[in-house]
Amino acid sequence: MQGNSKSKSLVKINPKIWLIQFILACFLLVGLQIYKPIQFNTDLSRLFNTMQPDKMAQLALDRFSAQVENQNILLIGHPNLTNAIADTANIANQLKQNSQLQQVQTQFNFIPEINSIVGFYQDYRHFLLSDDYRDILFKTLDNAQDNNAAQTSPNNALFEKQFALLNQLANPFVVSSLQIDPSLSLADYLANLPLPEQKFNQYQDYLYFEYQQNFYVLLRFSTKTSGLSLNDSHQLVSQINQLTAQLESDVLTSGQVFFADFASQSAQREMWLFSTLSVVGLILLIILAYRNLVSLISTLSLVGISLFYGYLGLNLCFTQVHILTFVFAVMLVGIAADYSFHALTELATQKGHLSKIKLPLVMGFISTAVGYLVLMFAPFAIFAQVGVFILAGLSGALISVLVLYPSLAVRFKLADRRNTLTRLSALNRLQLGYCQTGGFLIVCMLAVAASFYLAFSAQFNDDVRRFYKVSPELAESQQSIQNIIGLTDDFQFVLVRGDSPQTVMQDERQAVLSLTQLKADNVLTSFNAISQWLPTEQSQQNNKAALAKAYQAGQLDPFLAVTGQAFELNPNQQPLNLTTWLQSPLGKAYQPQWFDINGQYFSVIKLQGITDKNKVKKALEGQSSVLFVDKAGSVSEQLSHFRINLFKLLGFSLLAAALLLAGVYGLKKALFIVAIPLISVLFALSASALIQPELTVFNALACVLIIALGLDYAVFYADHGIALKISFATFVSALSSILVFAMLALSGTPAIYNFGLTVFIGIVITYLLAPFAALNQTARFQKVSG
Amino acid sequence: MLSRLNAVILVILSLLSANVFSAETDPQIQNQLNAFALNDGHGTFIQQKKFKLLTRAIESNGEYWIDNQQQQIIWQTNQPVFNRLVITADAVKEQNKPDSELKLLTQQPAFTQLLYSVFSGRLTDYPGIVWQSETDHCIQAKMDNTQLAQFVSQIQLCKLSSNNTQIRFFDNSQTETLIKLIADK
């Protein structure tokens, strides 16, 4: 056969060379473990990390994200506040002993009182005007200028404004500032500050909320880093669980560390469960199929070797690997075992030679490798990690099979061993039976129907938040905290950047104007910006000049007459600057929203309750220094782009495979080979779409593997016809893969479930359709003795 | 969420308060409180605000409308300047001109609840406020919370006649706001 003649040209490697490289690889891995040990990441937020095109903006986002992601909260609730406070203090004392924590906070005694706020701002009075006060003042001056009668016509609007302030039932700012600023401009400015409308209460410096007959006391803690190690995060969460289990109080938790711990524990459980079941299933399969110890040991060794190379690949390419990567990586067990089964079957029938299947094996590897190469260059950490692991593992497995298995066959006389090959002759006959042209036409028609269904009915949703496994208790706890505090955890904000603090403040002010309009239009519920509290210095100067002008024009006189107070402007006063404000009682809270990196200044505007992201984007797109950041949305969007590009790439890959295979097997056979994975993908996606509410990028990702395995199986049939040994090898290898992916389809992590389900269906269909690849050649029934 | 919380914590000036040790209202006092309840309808008021700093009181007058079903009070100052407050248990909104838009003044529940209950006369104990009998006709409440007390430290209500109620607010700097309500007969 064409393929067989070419396969002879493949380089033959001495097993001793393999051994030397394996020993070197072992040393390399040990060295890496000692000098650059790989870190296991449990931080969910970094699972789909994407990079901003602007490096500086990325640095700023990383810095801000780290501050937010390290924060966790507990709400300790009890019908009696004293008990709730006692329990909170108790937990806090215990947590303070934990070296992984940077800060444990229960008492918030820095909450500024009105007198201290007025005390701080009084030095900057006259520079600060509320929007309303400024409008009235400026209109007053404009009118006075127009009428040229400023001295004689005091403005009613200004007087009315001032009197209304004075007459208000309870405006503590008026009482506190009347003496130092009889114009009441400062009182009005302070009264109009964007104070939060939150339901906080304070008792003995503890902050608490009332919710459903309980008093919930706040405990906040931050970890030293956002990505704690598996053990550290688990230890911390266990400690908290132990502490809270002893309490009568209801404890609500929220924060990265809780979600990460749950996800990592769940991933670890699944990883060990799936690995163990895969290996046990594999052992049973080998015992049933080959009925000899050598086959069992060699297959398990090959799986072990592939896992070793996969792990080495991860160590070489990454410093941090997410724990979920290893759950996906379980599929390496199934694929590596495939190589072993094909080789063992061939060695049993060809007296210790692999020459006839070298080419199909290499072709199968290339098709699989191309699929995973795509993943390696994916802009998402987890895909790249899975890609590297599988590719490195399969490379190790392929080389080991080609180099070691022939020697094993000779040494252990595999050709003389019995296997269950002959018992599968019925299966072989069945395949021969249904692989008729008519059958293939029916399959093609069904595939067309499936593609129509996919095109018109199936829905994709790549919302990144749906891919994590969240425990119902944690989700409920998080929801309760959101209800109590009244805040959501959408990580959406605006980043303003500039060469100087003043430029940033000016640009932020522009952004705030747009956001104010969006808020009025109910596009967002609230936002939080420094410039809401601190006007630009230019604006402050303008304010003071306007107030001075109004005073000189006698516009303040009517109100001053009512109060009997004297107004005085201090010419030596300086406007309030950012550095001073950030140190003020109010400004301290905003310090995390302001930072500079290498001479560039950044300010963050936090957004809350966005109903239409596109409107926010559009409103801000005119400002080049302003970047709207919607982490989850942006990742989801990129995942969708990735999915679309992945499908395009898979289309091109199939085309390339067809051309490549046409060179080896001829065009007609190549088209049959390529049709198998293509049809399998269509069926697998359609079936998944019927089972799942919506398809995701992970269903698309599964197509990579379906195509790789589909090409693999189809090439074997195309190369050998519907031969008994191929039926046998394909059956055993398909069974091993099905075993692995059926287990993944049982995963509690939605991403893994989506992936496992589609691959599982895809492999079953691929296995059933693969014999059609031999349609255009004489079907042969080879009876091979076992 | 947590960083927002951080900001919120620092800048909090919440008027909310709760009395940790709140108790059931004494039935006898509750009877006295019930006497202050105002029916739906219209009335007028005179307000005097006495700042310690100022030699003379700031006087104003206006009218009010109570709608118990809608749980809404319209508090309108007519002299010397126009100002209209729309007070509900959830929010206080302000209008500086008869035809201008209502502007939200506050949504702080404790404060809005306090204003609504005092002006409608539908008084009851709730966290942070415990009413006590002062005389046969007068009751008073002291704010049992430092935060709320920054705005109002003490309230006194006196029933002067069947349609005549007097309300006095005090803050920490002893500014007194004296309001006389005269309900239409």
Image (spheres, rainbow, N blue to C red):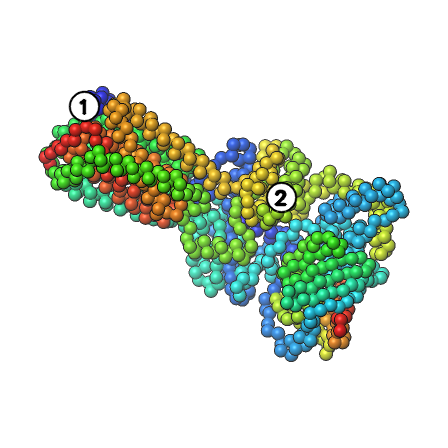
Q: In which quarter of the view is residue A502 placed?
A: top right
Which of the two residues, A477 or A131, is positioned nearer the viewer here? A131
User: Considering the image in quadrants, where does the C terminus of chain B appear?
Assistant: bottom right
Amino acid beneath label 2: Leu
Tell me if residue A29 can be seen: no
Secondary structure under tag 1 reads loop
Q: Say few, some or many: other residues with alpha carbon within 10 Å of mark 1 (under 14 / 14 to 19 / 20 or more).
A: few
Residue projecting furthest to the right? A152
Residue B137 location, quadrant: bottom right
Q: Which residue is mark 2?
A: A515
Instruction: Provide residue A593's location: percent of width, then percent of height.
Output: 60, 43
* Left or right of residue A21, residue A559 in this image: right
x then y, percent, for residue A468? 42, 46
Label 2, secondary structure: give it: helix
Q: Residue at x 73, y 55 (%)?
A: B95
- Report the label total: 2
Which one is nearer the viewer's eye here, A116 or A626? A626
Badge 1: chain ID: A
Q: Which mark is residue A1?
A: 1
Which label is found at residue A185? none
Asked whether the viewer can see residue B90, the reply is: yes
CA neighbours of label 2 inside 10 A, class few (<14), some (14 to 19), many (20+): many
Task: From the viewer's perspective, tell me whether residue A292 is left or right of residue B166.
Answer: left
Q: Can you say whether A107 is above or below A37 in the image?
A: below
Badge 1 amino acid: Met
Q: Earlier in the sequence, mark 1 or mark 2?
A: 1
- Give residue B160's quadrant in the image: bottom right
In the rendered image, the vertical position of residue B51 relative to residue A715, given as above or below = below
> Residue A238: x, y in percent?
42, 54
